[in-house]
Amino acid sequence: GVGPWDECFEVAVQLALRAGQIIRKALTEEKRVSTKTSAADLVTETDHRVEDLIVSELQKRFPSHSRFIAEEATASGAKCVLTHSPTWIIDPIDGTCNFVHRFPTVAVSIGFAVHQELEFGVIHHCTEERLYTGRRGQGAFCNGQRLRVSRETDLSKALVLTEIGPKRDPDTLKVFLSNMERLLHAKAHGVRVIGSSTLALCYLASGAADAYYQFGLHCWDLAAATVIIREAGGTVIDTSGGPLDLMSCRVVAAGTREMAALIAQALQTINYGRDDEK
Ligand code: IPD
């Protein structure tokens, strides 16, 4: 049957593919790079260009949709609020630092929520031509292949992914490194940092890793990926062990509830504030 958000989903897929073409072409060209909240929080003209394209096309196709949460608009002061209205949550380039360095792990992420519930997510790994999708109640896929998370429950057999986050002051780095140290002391097989939260979460959804955690990611890093992970059978929670809060800038995701709980227990908090209080 035809679902209520099918057309939105199809348009999101087309736009993620189009955006990916632009990013792939721009990857090898000269870039003008600026910084945002820290010296490690980067933005380029391509981030703006891709965001403008996605938002303006969505407005054209769905004139009744007025809610957009998009990374670069937020950086220039737009508020992050999730209301009951249909809301698009967009990261035009996830992995901007990778993009700047031509490290080929770069994605476009488009999530969609209605009544504060995530309906679908589309993530385009644009340097590898992989399209990850998840729709509530309809499964998660990569290039048409069904995704399944790992069933691992033992931290001493886990491959764990994380991202550093933009804050680099000594106190933050101390806690970041000590969190990693705790997981290695617990004998995790490895900890990986690939430079893109959305793609790390897609690898988790694919069963290529057992857990993911981060402090300092944003709702646009998390929205689309959360649907994909849940539809692949995984768990997405807050680092406190409680339910996920999309605006809290922190997350633990895992194939199993047991694994997510073990990771959450091991972590010390890094406070990044909230996306909806900025
Ligand atoms: C960032 C990347 C990075 C993660 C940050 C994200 P951006 O997204 O995913 O790996 O550490 O938390 O905000 O700025 O490249 O879209």
Image (cartoon, grey):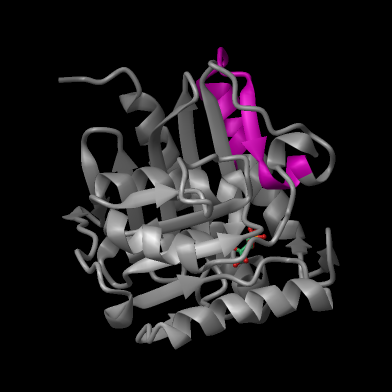
How many numbered marks appear? 0
Quadrant for the C terminus in the image: top right
Residue 216 in which image quadrant = bottom right
Q: Is residue 196 magenta?
A: no
Residue 29 appears in the figure: no
Q: Residue furthest left?
A: 1
Residue 245 in which image quadrant = top right
Where does the image place residue 240, in percent across and percent down from the top left? Answer: 53, 51
- Please name whichever residue, 151 or 185, is drawn nearer the observer in this view of the structure: 185
User: Which residue: 72% across, 56% down?
Assistant: 271
Query: Relative to 211, is 15 on the left or the right?
Result: right
Question: Can you say whether 179 is above or below 129 in the image?
Answer: below
User: Which residue: 58% across, 42% down?
Assistant: 90
Where does the image place residue 34, in percent across and percent down from the top left? Answer: 84, 65
Range covered by the magenta-colored residues: 54-74
Query: Relative to 11, is 141 on the left or the right?
Result: left
Where does the image place residue 226, in percent across and percent down from the top left? Answer: 41, 46
- Please name whichever residue, 81 or 50, is drawn nearer the observer in this view of the structure: 81
Residue 4 appears in the figure: yes
